[in-house]
Image (cartoon, helix red, strand yellow):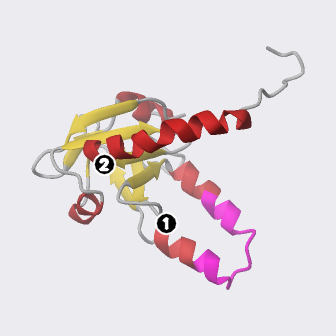
């Protein structure tokens, strides 16, 4: 799982260090296919990036496989997630190079904030994230009833 919020520097070449916990969350950065990195794409909900490991995109694909092949909504999601995704390989220091179009889309300039959200993460401009978080606290308070304990049959 991707947990916590970490802000790192984005250098002039578009490189940013991915938090160590995030690299660990995707299996030390290596998928079954041998890919050593993360996958990111422009969010459908605003000027930030979403990301995860290849396993997350495989789950998205399995979900879309349940939808009629020529469905317009399926096609739209494929274009906006899969066709827009970038596989970013880790360098020896755990950094990735964010393509210019992605950091421009998210308004990233100098600092990058990684936000862990369980199975996925987001990448924000710190200033834009603060504006978003101002609206989330009240909604989270109103929505906490959705968090229900899962009974595991006494195997705790």
Q: Is residue 26 visible?
A: no
Q: Earlier in the sequence, mark 2 or mark 1?
A: 1
Choose top left, top right, bottom left or bottom right for residue 148: top right
Closer-to-camera residue (107/14) = 107
**From the image, which quarter does the C terminus lie in?**
top right
Q: Which residue is mark 2?
A: 128
Q: Is residue 68 above or below residue 138?
A: below
Which residue has dot 1 on it? 81
The structure residue drawn at horizontal position 38% and vertical position 55%, both measured from the top left corner, is 49
Q: Are marks 2 and 1 in contact (CB under 8 Å)?
A: no
Residue plotted at (63% across, 38% down): 142
For the N terminus, give its image quadrant.
top right
Q: Position of residue 135 (x, y in %)?
A: 45, 44
Instruction: Say if 33 sits above or below 111 in the image.
Output: below
Q: CA distance from mark 2 to mark 1?
A: 22 Å
Q: How packed is label 2: few (under 14 Cα within 10 Å), some, or many (20 or more)?
A: some
Relative placement, left or right, of 20 versus 120 is left
Q: Position of residue 75 (x, y in %)?
A: 58, 79
In the image, taking residue 118 as reference, residue 70 lies left or right, namely: right
Which class describes the residues within 10 Å of circle 1: few (<14), some (14-19), or many (20+)? Answer: some
Residue shown at the point (31%, 40%) measured from the top left: 113
Which residue sits at x=67%, y=85%?
Answer: 70
State which region is magenta: 60-75
Return the residue nearer the eye: 147 or 151.
Answer: 147
Whether residue 104 is visible here, answered yes or no, is: yes
Quadrant in the picture for residue 76: bottom right
Q: Can residue 130 be found in the magenta stretch? A: no
């Amino acid at each position: 799982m991707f947990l916590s919020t970490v802000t790192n520097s984005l250098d002039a070449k578009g490189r940013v260090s991915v938090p160590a916990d995030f690299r660990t969350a995707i299996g030390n950065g290596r998928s079954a296919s041998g890919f050593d990195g993360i996958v990111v794409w422009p969010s459908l909900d605003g000027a930030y990036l979403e990301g995860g490991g290849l396993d997350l995109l495989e789950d998205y694909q399995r979900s879309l496989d349940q939808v009629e092949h020529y469905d317009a909504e399926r096609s739209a999601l494929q274009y906006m997630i899969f066709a827009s995704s970038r596989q970013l390989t880790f360098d020896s220091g755990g950094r990735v190079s964010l393509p210019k179009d992605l950091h421009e889309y998210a308004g990233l300039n100098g600092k990058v904030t990684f936000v862990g959200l369980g199975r996925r993460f987001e990448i924000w401009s710190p200033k834009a994230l603060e504006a978003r978080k101002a609206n989330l606290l009240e909604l989270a308070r109103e929505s906490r009833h959705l968090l229900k304990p899962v009974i595991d049959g006494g195997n705790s």
